[in-house]
Image: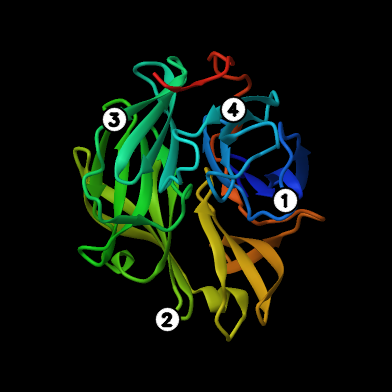
Amino acid sequence: MSSEGSQFVSLDKDGLHLLDVQEKKSVKLGLPFALPDKTEPVCVLHCNGMLCLTLEYSNSRFTKKQDNSLVILNPATNRFKFIPVVKPGQRSDVFGFGYDKFSDDYKIVTIIEGRTYIFKFKSNCWEESKPVPSHDFVFKYRAGGTVVDNNMYWIAYRSDKKENSILSFDFTKEEFQEQTLPINSRWKINSWLGVLRGEVCVIDHYPDLADDISVYAPQRSGPKIVRWDSSVWVRTRKALSLRGPIKIAAACVTGGGELVITLTGYKGHDRYGDKMLVYEAKDEKFREIRFENTSLRGVRCMCEYAKSSSFVSVSVDKPKTKC
């Protein structure tokens, strides 16, 4: 397996872990806060090696003394920066974290009741920005997006059209754009966004078709996606030597182009374990990657982790709620 982009991050109630697939090592990283005893996996976004972390609910508190819902953490230096909520008690629909290379500024974007708010690291505060194109977007995951180059991408359900689409946010223009999805991804199929050869890609899991997996790469006309080409098609049950249905908790593509999935195991309603598997295209088989005593919940692929060796040069003063 390629070493490029083969690092993952996993964050559960037992802590933050950096997973190196090639070395099969798990390193527990320090957190600037204590996780509550009973909490769902923390949502994780990443950009240039830095992590943007948030609990499952935006009004949760990291500690009794802090009333923050977001924290930026650089695992390479263990430096961090707390970011306050826009308004206390408000629950956001979705988060995005990215870098604007033209203004040389990191930004966080969130949507609250159809309104867009952007936190800019240089100004150290939230600003209200252009509204979402439609109030009919419903996001399945609050922090389930993918950042590629200068844009953040999410899969969102359009309740008015009764189908899924891609909503993207340009961190430079601070504008939204709606993009089409592959035809099969627009309805009730398990889909994830990833990065393939420096471009956003769509990973589809088809439970009704022997749990097969397809990876789609976009073909563009300018910034607009005009069609999707299927670059990988995995006969999953055959590759796993299984007959019955499977539960895929997450799927991604590493920087080296390998397909990695996390399987979730259940016995009745009780969860009993997860497995991380990498697809070997040559043999058409999945190979398990074992990490001892490490939770695989909330796994995110850190394709650009190794690129960042120091924290960005932003103020670590207490952020302002609004400019």
Q: Position of residue 300 (x, y in %)?
A: 57, 48
Q: Can the viewer see residue 39 in this picture?
A: yes
Q: Position of residue 138 (x, y in %)?
A: 34, 57
Q: Determine whether the residue tagged by mark 1 lies in a helix, strand or loop.
A: loop
Which kind of residue does numbered mark 4 sit on? Phe
What whole-number distance in Å separates the C-alpha atoms at marks 4 and 2?
43 Å
What whole-number distance in Å separates the C-alpha atoms at marks 4 and 3?
21 Å
Residue farthest toward the bottom in the current orientation of the protein: 243
Residue 173 picture quarter: top left
> Looking at the image, do the residues carrying marks 4 and 3 touch, with CB atoms under 8 Å apart?
no
Which kind of residue does numbered mark 2 sit on? Asp
Residue 243 picture quarter: bottom right
Residue farthest toward the right in the current orientation of the protein: 293
Residue located beneath label 4 in the image: 82
Identified at 29% across, 65% down, the residue is: 186
Q: Determine whether the residue tagged by mark 2 lies in a helix, strand or loop.
A: loop
Residue located beneath label 3 in the image: 129
Residue located beneath label 1 in the image: 13
Q: Along the horizontal axis of the image, is 39 left or right of 239?
A: right
Q: Position of residue 261 (x, y in %)?
A: 57, 61
Q: Determine whether the residue tagged by mark 3 lies in a helix, strand or loop.
A: strand
Mark closest to the chain's N terminus, 3 or 1: 1
For marks 3 and 2, give the one nearer the viewer. Answer: 3
Q: Which mark is residue 208?
A: 2
Q: Along the horizontal axis of the image, is 85 left or right of 225?
A: right
